[in-house]
Image: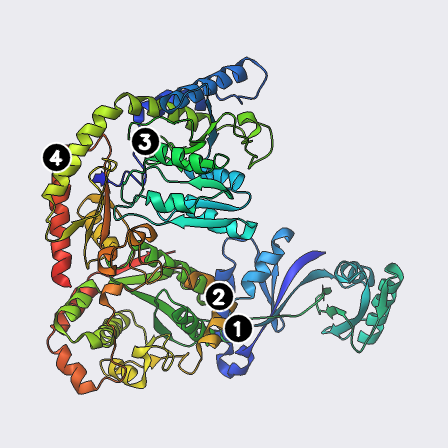
Amino acid sequence: MIYLDNAATTRPDPEAFDRAQAYCSDHFYNPSARYGGGFAVASAVGEARENLLAKIADPGKFELIFTSGGTESDNQAVFSCARRGNAVTTAGEHAAVERPFSALKNRGVEPRFAPLNRDGSVNAEALLSLVDEKTSLVSVIHVNNETGAVNEIADLAKRVKRKNPRCVFHSDGVQAFGKIPFRLTSEIDLYSVSAHKIGGLKGTGALIKRKELTLSPYLYGGGQESGLRSGTENVFGLLDFAYAAEKKFAALERDAARIRLLREAFWASLDQKIFMRISPENGSPYILTASASGTRGEVLSRMLWDRGVVVGTGSACSSKHRFSRVIAACGYPENVLDGVLRISFSPQTTEQEAEKAAALMNEAAREFKEKL
Amino acid sequence: MEKVVIIRYAEIHLKGKNRGYFERVFAVNLEKSLKGIRHELHRTSGRWLVEKFEETRAEEIAERISKVFGVHSYSVGYLVGSSLEEIYAGAALIAPREGTFKVETHRAYKKYPLTSMELSAQIGGRLLHEFPALAVDVHRPQNTVYIDVRENGTALVFGSFEEGAGGMPVGTSGRGLLLISGGIDSPVAGYMMAKRGMTVELLHFHSYPYTNEGAKEKVVALAKILSQYSLVTELCTIRVTKIQEEIHAKCAAELNVTLLRRFMFRIAERFASENGLQCLITGESLGQVASQTIEGMTSSNAVVTLPVLRPLVGFDKDEIILRSKKIGAYDTSILPFEDCCTVFLPEHPAIKPKLAYIEEEESKLDVDALVEEALGTAERITF
C-alpha cells in the first residue's frame, strides 16, 4: 500500500511510540499525585511541554496547553476570544474553525469570512478590510489543509494588530507544525497544533498561547494545564507527541526540501491532459491537490485504493455536500470540483512510491474518463 | 411471586385446522426474538408466558416481544399463587399510588371460592386502605389492575395491555425477496410483507467503486433493524457496476434508470428461483420518482415472471416516512450515503418510456452475460 493521505493522518512513528510506552507500564502514575511516582510523571510531562513549545516559540513569551487535538484547540480559541462585536476568519478554514465561527451567530457575535485566492490562500486585503474596531478575534489557517497554500500569518497578524491592537489573532497550524519552518511572532496570540499529522497519535494536540493572554477554560475540574484544561493528562499521547515532534523538527528543512522536489516530480508525471493542478508551487511541499475534471474524486480514490494507492479526496458522490467547501471558495467550476484529489506526502514517502502512484493515478483516471 | 410477560396472539386463532402449525411457527419466532436472554417460554390456554428471566430484563423482553408479528397484545405482570394474600401482594406492586383505578378479574378456574366481582372488591378494598390517595372509578379509571385466576392454582396480575405488532407469524405466508436500497421505502415494504407472515430475504445492489462501503454499511444497519421484525439475519449484495457502465456507454441516457431496474429485476428473479423464493418485493410507490410510473413498473415487470409485490404502491411519501419512523428505520435511512453515484444520473430521465424503445436500446447490450456476471459477485453478509 502506498500511503499518500498524510494530511488526513500519518502512520504513528514507531520509535516515539516505543519511547512513550514506559508511561503505559512502569510509569503509569497520575501526574497530579503527590508522591514520587506522580512527580516523576509530572516532570516528564513538563519536559515534553517545554520541548514542544521550544520547537516553535519563545518559551519566555508563550506557553503550551495540551488538548485532545486540533479541533479542541480551535474551539477553545474561538469561543474564548470571540466574545463581542465581530470575528473575522477566511473561507478556507478547516471545519474545526469554520463551524465554531458559524455558531458565533447564536452568541451575538458576527462572523465574517474573507474570500480566498485561486490557490486557497486568503485574500489579505479583503481580510484586512473586514477587521474593524469591533473585531474581537481574527483566525487564519496557516497551511490550507485542502490545497497546501500557505498564509503569511506573521505578516497578516502584524497588519491586523496595526488596525486593531486589541483583537486576538489565532491560527490553525495543524498542517504547518513540523512541516514548514516557522516560529511564532509576538503578534500571534494563539496557535493550534495536532500530534497525529506528524507521526503522533490521534486524540492529542495543543494550543499554544501568548502568556499575557487570558483565556477562559473550556473544561473545569482538577485544574490541570494551569487550570485551562482540566482532566488527567493523556500522558502517553503527549509524550509520544513530543518524541515524534523531536524527530520531525530535527529533519524539518531537509525533509521539506526533498519532498518539494518529490512533489514536483510527481506532478510532472501526472497526465496534464487529465489533471489540473490546484496546489500552488510555493505552498506546503507536503500537499498536492489536483483535479481530474469531470470524474468523481471519491470514486477515483476507491479505484486507487483497489490498486494499492491511498489518496484523499475533496469531493463526494453524494448529491448533498458534493463539493469541497474550501476548493469551491477558490472559484473553480463544478466539473473541476467533482474530480478533486489530494495527494499528501510524508518524509517516509520514497521517490519510487511517488513514481508508481503517479502512474497508477494516470491509469485509473484514464479508465474512469473512458467510461464517461 | 415471579415477574412474567404475558403474550396474546392475533389472527392465529382464525386459522382452523392449520392452527397447530401457525402456533408452532409463532413459538419459534418468539424464541428467536428472545435470543440471548435467559428465559422459559410456556404456552397456557390461549396465550404464552415468558418466565424465569432476570427481573431487570423485563422491559427488554417486552420491547422485543412488541416487534414479533402475530402478537396481538402483551403485558408485563406477576405470576402469583391463587390465595387472596398472594394475589394482593402482586396487585399492590402493580397498583398506582394515586388517582382513580379499578380491579378487573377474570377466572378461568370457575371453582375459585370467590366470584370475579367478589375478588375484585376484596383486592380493591385492600388497595384503597393501603394507599389513601387512590379512589375507585369503575367507569373511567386512570388505571386498571387485572387479575386472571388460572386453573393450576396460580393467578396473573398485571396493569395494562400493550398493543402488539399484529399480523401473522413470519414464516407462515411464503418467502419473498426484498430489493433493499439504502433509502426510506424498501425497509418499510419489507416490514409490511413480514407483517403478513412472509419470510423476507434481502438483496442489495451496489456499484462499487461508484458507491462506497458507507452505503453498504447503511444497508446492513437497515437490515438489522428490519430483522427485529422479520427475523432474517442475512443480506446478499450483488455488484452491478459493469451493467451501469455498459448502459451508460451504449444506451440512451434518459433510459439509464429504467434499464438498470430491468437488470435488477432479472438478477433478483434468478436469485429468487435459486433460493426457493416465491416473489419479488420492492418499495416502489406510484409516481414517487421518474422510474416509478406505471410505464416504469410495466417495463420492469416485463422481464420477470415471478409476482412483484409493491406494498407501498398507494402510499404518499409522508405515510411511508411515518411507518419508517415507527419501525425505527428512519434515522438510519436518511444518513447521507448515496446508493447511486451522480455520474450515472441522467438530467432528464424518461418518465413514460415505451416498451419497444426500451427493448431496442437494451438490444445493444449482452443482457445474459451481464446478468450472469453480476450473479457471480454475490456476497452474503450475516449479522
Along the line of sight, the residue nearer the viewer: B144 or A293: A293
**1 and 2 marks in contact (CB < 8 Å):** yes
Q: Residues within 10 Å of mark 3 (few under 14, many from 20)?
A: many
Residue beneath disc 1 = B70
Classify the position of the N terminus of chain A by image quarter: top left
Amino acid type of the residue that numbered disc 3 sits on in the rendered structure: Ile
- The chain containing the residue under callout 3 comes to A
Asked where in the image residue B66 lies, by quadrant, the reply is: bottom right
Q: Position of residue B177 (x, y in %)?
A: 33, 71
Please state which of the two labelled residues, at mark 3 or mark 2, is closer to the viewer.
3
Residue beneath disc 3 = A198
Amino acid type of the residue that numbered disc 1 sits on in the rendered structure: Gly
Q: Secondary structure at mark 1?
A: loop
**4 and 3 marks in contact (CB < 8 Å):** no
Please state which of the two labelled residues, at mark 4 or mark 1, is closer to the viewer.
4
Q: Secondary structure at mark 2?
A: helix
- The chain containing the residue under callout 4 comes to A
Label of residue B29 in the image: 2
Query: At 46% across and 77% down in the image, what residue appears?
Result: B196
Residue beneath disc 4 = A352
First in sequence, mark 1 or 2: give its number: 2
Apparent side of residue B37 relative to residue A279 in the rendered image (left or right): right
